[in-house]
Image (spheres, coloured by chain):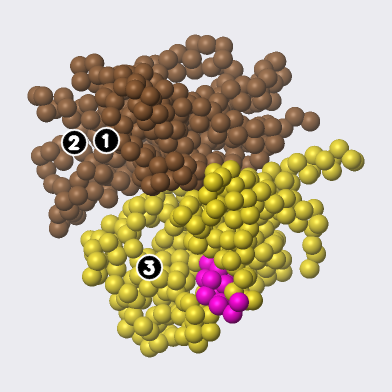
Amino acid sequence: MKIDKFKVLSSAIAVFFGFLIGAIIIGLIGIGNPDMNFTTLFSKFYEATIQGVFTGDLSKTGDWLMISSIIILTGLSVAFAYKGNIFNIGAEGQFVAGAFCATIAGITLNLPTGIHAIVALLIGILAGSLYALIPGILKAYYNVSEVVVTIMLNWIAVYYTSYLVTDFFAGDYSDKTNNIKESASIISPYLSDIFNTRIYYGFIVAIIALVIYYIILNKTKYGYELKAVGYNVNAANYAGIKTKRKIMSTFMISGAFSGAAGAIYALGAVDFFAASTTFLNYGFDGITVAFLGQMSTFGMIISSLLLAGFRSTGRIFVGNYKEIIDVVIGIILIFSVLGPHVLNKIRGGRK
Amino acid sequence: MEYIWKTLIDILIFSTPLIVTALGGMFSEKSGIVNIGLEGIMTFSAFLTALGILLAESAGIHSILALAIGILFGIIGGLIFAALHATLTIKFQVDQIISGTAINIIGLGLAIFLTKIIYGASSTPFKSTFNEKIFGIPLLVLIVIALVFVSKFIMDKTKFGLRLKACGENPYAASSVGINVERVRFQAVLISGVLGAIGGASMVILISSNFSANTIAGNGFIALAVLIFGRWNPIGILFAGLLFGFLRKLGTIITVLPSDFALPLILVLIILIACIAVIVIFKNKIINVLLMIVVYIMILNLIYFGHQIPSVYYSILPYIMTIVALVYYSQDKVEPKALGKPYEVN
């Protein structure tokens, strides 16, 4: 695998600044508070990720890996679309659609163990895919920018699924569904026992998705044409590529990744779907995963682990100040897109 | 009669943050810079406004001055984020969508983080200063309505407005006649920061009276919808803002959900389809505005005299209407031609 040192450098700088600015904010605000100083962010990050490997208590490490298996999928979703020059901010909405439909399938269907889980997962993937087809059709046939449409669809997904939950699928509580059936669960009892936390087969889905992403983009004619359409629609059209179909299928594949993320979240991380008027942010984290990982398969594995590390850090953060993690992630996102521009200028200057 | 007057003022109040924020978005987008960071700008400014008012109150100021101090705090916050967005997108030509997304993430995160640090809770205390009112209408609402017409004047009649629009249509042509495109765009984004900040501030002053994570919760994106539905035009924004503000209010106050919702839903759909048909046939701005008023009155009728619709439909209607509007405008080329495209000088 070819590794571009230049890209690695700019992403490393992004993470460095994320850590640095986060640490400074926490340090400055924590003056006089023994729980918060300049090293808190680092120590908590360590505690939330790999510390378990050395102490033997793997629960936090397990949680960390599970979060990263979800956000790598939304990251792949954003990255795949971006390869076709499509900005899929709708990963969040497709995630919600996938999670909701997988949950409903997990509750209502009656199937044998295992098959039920796979069917629910596929329904979630299909839901994300179809939800992404809406901006796909609008872009292909009406040349409507996908950015605003997907932003609007995110909110529609959140509001509408909440309404469906409270009015039609509420279980024992009015604001969430009942738990999915045992047969639809993707939790691995064996691994959960080892890690002492919920471990689910989402990581297998994530690995399959990574392989699919790599193969489609690097080894197939489809991937080549996708990049051609992304580069110049008119030229691709002229070269005989069916651009309308390509744009729509790109959206559908992108949405399928996000739908899968939502499905494994619903079937593994929680067992229900809760009504909410805010986002869970897994889709938005996908944007950072994609750009920090520079859209490369290997890069996104690393970036999803880092991002999930920050999210896990947020969960154990002292004094419940987990919002500082949003600031850190925002800074990382800015620097991961700023880095290539600045480094390019430096590099260009040398030439 | 008094009840109707009160309802109308309520609708005005709920529309005000959307209208002023959408005006901000208009300045930015007309110059060619997409600003989806308005949500983050509103959120952070709302926090700073609450902070400013509370600080003023604790210093013993309880007049309208406290509110002015709050707005000033908010504007400073808006300017900081707008300057960040402008620097990233204009100086470094970073993707405008990513910059905006990052600002949304940071704005919300930082605001709640600081609220927790300062007040030890996830929301600030409530302000106690009353709003200055004229005939029952809060002063801030009147100021924002005035801003609509000021913006209209700036856009159509001043050198700055015309240059700004030129930068959004064709920056290279604008540059060739001696306009400093980067400078104009920078100023436009800063203006959007100030107006977005007033939007966030008005949310606190007029509606919530404090700051929490739920204060803005998507209003920045509704403002984006208002901007698009208002066709990047101040008067259009005024009407679209009134409509969407009204829907937003309905979405938040109506909690009684009737069992049969099919009929009202179909009615709303028919109204919408009829509107779109007329918009497509007539392709006229005045018709567009009139239609919004018609939709508005018909929905009003539905509410007061007819069937109750599940509140979710009021919540999602602005988003659906925006998507429909975008499809329609795509034939019409209303949006600035160079929108979202970086201006690169070699």
Q: Colour of chain A?
A: yellow
- Return the residue found at the far right: A351
Amino acid type indicated by mark 3: Cys
Q: Position of residue A232 (x, y in %)?
A: 68, 47
Write the start and end of the magenta stretch as one range: A55-67
Q: Are marks 1 and 3 on the same chain?
A: no
Residue A136 to residue B192: above or below: below
Residue B246's disc is: 1
Is B215 on the left or on the right of A3, as rendered?
left
Who's the residue at 43% across and 46% down the image?
B116
Do residues under tags 1 and 2 come within 8 Å of each other at their CB atoms?
yes
Q: Residues within 10 Å of mark 2 (few under 14, many from 20)?
A: some
Q: Position of residue B54 (x, y in %)?
A: 37, 30
Amino acid type indicated by mark 2: Leu
Helix, strand or loop for disc 3:
helix
The chain holding disc 1 is B
Is A151 on the left or on the right of B300, as rendered?
right
Helix, strand or loop for disc 2:
helix
Is A310 on the left or on the right of A164, as rendered?
right
Amino acid type indicated by mark 1: Phe
Q: Are marks 3 and 2 on the same chain?
A: no
Residue A56: in magenta span = yes
Residue A34: in magenta span = no
Nearest to the observer: residue A108 or residue A171: A171
Identify residue for label 2.
Answer: B300
Is B87 on the left or on the right of B15, as rendered?
right
